[in-house]
Amino acid sequence: MTLGNVGGPYAVSHIPVESHPNIVWHWEDDFDTVERKKVEGWLTEVNGAVEATLGEYPFEMHFHIYRRNNSREPVPWANTRRNDRQGVNFHIDPTYPLQSFLNDWTAPHEISHLSIPYLGRNFAWFAEGYASFMQYQIMERLGIYTNDQLSEKYAGKLERVKPFYDRDKDFVTVARELQKRHRYSDMYWGGASFFLNLDDSLKRMHDISLTELIQEYLTCCRMEDDTLEEVIDSWDRIIGGTACSELLNSYRTEPASEVLEMF
C-alpha cells in the first residue's frame, strides 16, 4: 500500500496575503499591529492550502486568537468551535517567527476538522483520525513536506501506535478504550489508519482520492449532514459505491490487530 500519495506541492507564494473574506477575526487579547499581521498571514496561508486541498468551505470561519506568552511552541493549544458558528480557538505565542507557525501542524489539523460536521465525543476516533490524516495533506500543499516525507510521516505514526491495537477486540472498541485512558495521540493515529485505508481504496476502485471526495462533499452535503452515518452515506453516494460504509463496518467488527495488519 502506498501511503500519502496525494497531489503535488502547493506554492505558498500563490496564496493571497490579504485576509480571506470567509475568515472573521476575533482578537481576544491584546496584539500589536505587527503581531496581527503575522497571525493573519499565517492563517490566511494555511487556509489557502486547505482550500487547495479540500475546497472552499460553505460558511464563514471565526478565528478567535488568544495570547500565550513564554510558550515552548508557537501554538500550545487550539480547538474547534462548533455551536452556532464554525471556527477555531487559537492560543498562540506571537513572539515566534512566521515560519515556525507555518511549520506547526495545529492550524491544518483544526481547520480540516471543519470540513466535516461535529460527530460527538463517541466518534472522536473518526474525527481526530480524519484531521490527523488531513493535516499532513495540507502541509504538503504548503510545501512543508514532500510526498515522500508524507509517506514516512504516516508510516512512522502508524508503526508507533500498532502495539496499542494488538488486540482481539474490534478497532472502535479499542480506540474508545484508549480515549478513556487519555491516550489521545494513540487514538488519533489509529483513527488515521481508516483514512489512509479509504484513500487507497478510493484511488484503486473509483479513481478518486479522499481529498477530491471531500471537495465534492463540501459542495453537495456538508451543510446537510449531522451524524457519522449521514457523512458515510454521502461519501458513498458521491463515489457511487459502498467502499466507505464497508470500511467503517470492518473497523466496527474486525479485530483491531487485523485492521492495522496491512500497514
Image (cartoon, rainbow, N blue to C red):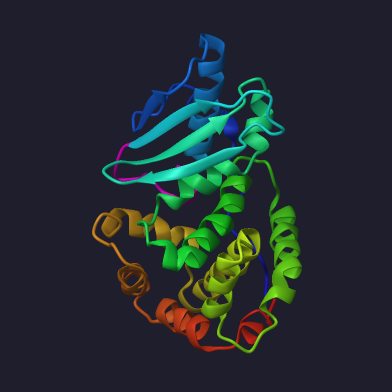
Q: Position of residue 73 (x, y in %)?
A: 69, 34
Q: Is residue 39 magenta?
A: no
| Image quarter of residue 94 | top right
Residue 208 placement, left or right of 6 = left
Foreground residue among 206 and 225: 225
Q: Position of residue 34 (x, y in %)?
A: 56, 11
Residue 255 placement, left or right of 121 = right
Answer above or below: position of 134 versus 86.
Answer: below
Q: Residue at x 43, y 76 (%)?
A: 244
**Residue 202 seen:** yes
Answer above or below: position of 181 versus 7.
Answer: below
Q: Main secondary structure of the magenta part?
A: loop
Residue 13 placement, left or right of 238 = right
Q: Residue furthest left?
A: 224
**Residue 52 seen:** no
Q: Position of residue 71 (x, y in %)?
A: 68, 29
Answer above or below: position of 256 versus 97.
Answer: below
Q: Residue at x 66, y 66 (%)?
A: 3
Q: Position of residue 255 (x, y in %)?
A: 60, 88
Answer above or below: position of 258 versus 5.
Answer: below
Total labels drawn: 0
Quarter of the figure that contains the C terminus: bottom right
| Image quarter of residue 191 | bottom right
Foreground residue among 17 and 207: 17
Q: Residue at x 63, y 23 (%)?
A: 69
Foreground residue among 98 and 15: 98
Q: Residue at x 61, y 45 (%)?
A: 139
Q: Is residue 57 magenta?
A: yes
Magenta stretch bounds: 51-60
Quarter of the figure that contains the N terminus: bottom right
Q: Residue furthest top?
A: 33
| Image quarter of residue 99 | top right
